[in-house]
Amino acid sequence: MAVRKGIESSLAIAEAAAACNVDCIAAYPITPQTHIVEHLSELVNDGVLDAEFIPVESEHSAMSCCCGTAAAGARTFTATSSQGLALMHEIMFIAANLRLPIVMTVANRALSAPINIWNDHSDVMTERDCGWLQIFGENGQESTDLVPICHKIAEDKRVLLPIMLNFDGFIVSHVVEPIEMLTREEIATFLPDYEPQQRLDVDNPITMGPVGMPEVYTEAKMAHEAAVRNAYGPICEILEEFGQKFGRTYKPVETYKTEDADIVFVMMGAASETCMSWVDKVREQGKKVGIVRFRLWRPLPVEAFKEAVQGKKVLGIIDRHFSPGGAGGPVAQEVKYTLYGEKDAPKAVEVVAGLGGRDIDFDTFDKIFDRCQKVLDGGEVPPFELIQARGGHYGKI
């Protein structure tokens, strides 16, 4: 039976990967994900996990190695963060387009410069177009549960794509929580033995990753696009199956107290839990506000999001990354794309907060709500703003 114990989230994630009977871990240490692969190395060394642990000289090599082991038919796991994920960038596209079912946990951390080891979402958002499936955990329990879920999604015969499990660095990765740890036997009832659909085999040779001439490249990209979009149905089925089996259900888009809300905050990650507490507080003051959170980021759950915000008046979209010189933050860009042309679509108030680990506290949510309330009362929609920047609006700093 599952055991509930106090454990650091990173260690719980590592033990969940071990309980999934991964065959190979190729990794390089980087703050704040190091405890995950460090603990996995201990489990392999101590004989608790029968797997190959491959220490490499960089994250670029780690992802390259993962491509090799996954192509050979091994259940493959890795972890990274920030600059490490950025260093993997070249190989991320290869893993995705070769349809290699790698599972990678990412302890989200700000990208340099200046050097910053604290949390925001700049690393994952920079990789949003790499063709991986992407999902978010908000706390240690969720992130631990999502490890076997991710393996089942990636390896599903209808999917066969790599998947990135994101959670906030330090805010989640280094926090000790009471987590219900599923046993290997329990996970085995949910996650079957891995049966690769194609693999490198000297007795049955195939070609992976040949040159894509102009005559075939566009069609290859279209096939990949179809694979990512078509993964949505199996993802929903697998999330539902996990919930029915273990009692904790996850959905591509999740809501909190939105039923009668005029103003809804749109966000993802651990800050959502702080925002829930804030919503509870201001609800007592009569303010009708709720939260819509993206759990699934790729494929983008368009219809589920539309349903979640239907009838709302104003969306306060909170990004933890933005495009310098561009059109604001990536979450806001996706939301506005999703709602473009929709009749009576809610107005979008865009803010960027929590960069480089700056706390998103109740005062921050108050400021965002005030901006949304002004729009609800008939005011103009303001341009996106780095809401916590000292000196005022970003354009006046």
Image (cartoon, grey):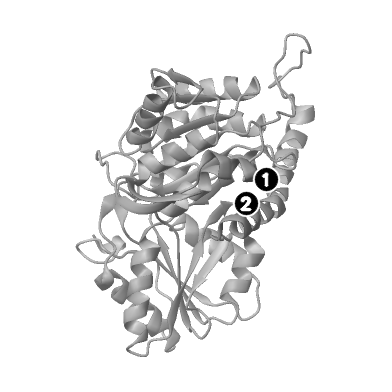
For the point 40% across and 55% down, the residue is 139
Question: Is residue 325 visible to the viewer in this orientation of the structure?
Answer: no
In the rendered image of this protein, does residue 291 appear above or below residue 201? Answer: below
- Counting from the top left corner in percent of width and height, residue 56 is at 41, 18
Gap between marks 1 and 2 measured at Cα? 6 Å
Question: Could you say which quadrant of the image residue 192 lies in?
Answer: top right
Question: Is residue 357 visible to the viewer in this orientation of the structure?
Answer: yes
Q: Which quadrant of the figure contains the C terminus? A: bottom left
For the point 56% across and 74% down, the residue is 309
Along the line of sight, which residue is nearer the eye, 394 or 265?
Answer: 265
Horizontal side of residue 199 vs 294, given as left or right: right
Classify mark 1: helix, strand or loop.
helix
**Which mark sits nearer the N-terminus, 1 or 2?**
1
State the residue position of label 2.
299
Horizontal side of residue 30 vs 306, given as left or right: left
Q: Which mark is residue 228?
A: 1
Classify mark 2: helix, strand or loop.
loop
Residue type, mark 2 in image: Pro
Residue type, mark 1 in image: Val
- Counting from the top left corner in percent of width and height, residue 126 is at 46, 43
Along the line of sight, which residue is nearer the eye, 93 or 382?
Answer: 93
Q: Which mark is residue 268?
A: none
For the image shown, how many numbered marks are present on the structure? 2
Disc 1 to disc 2: CB gap under 8 Å:
yes
For the point 48% across and 49% down, the residue is 2
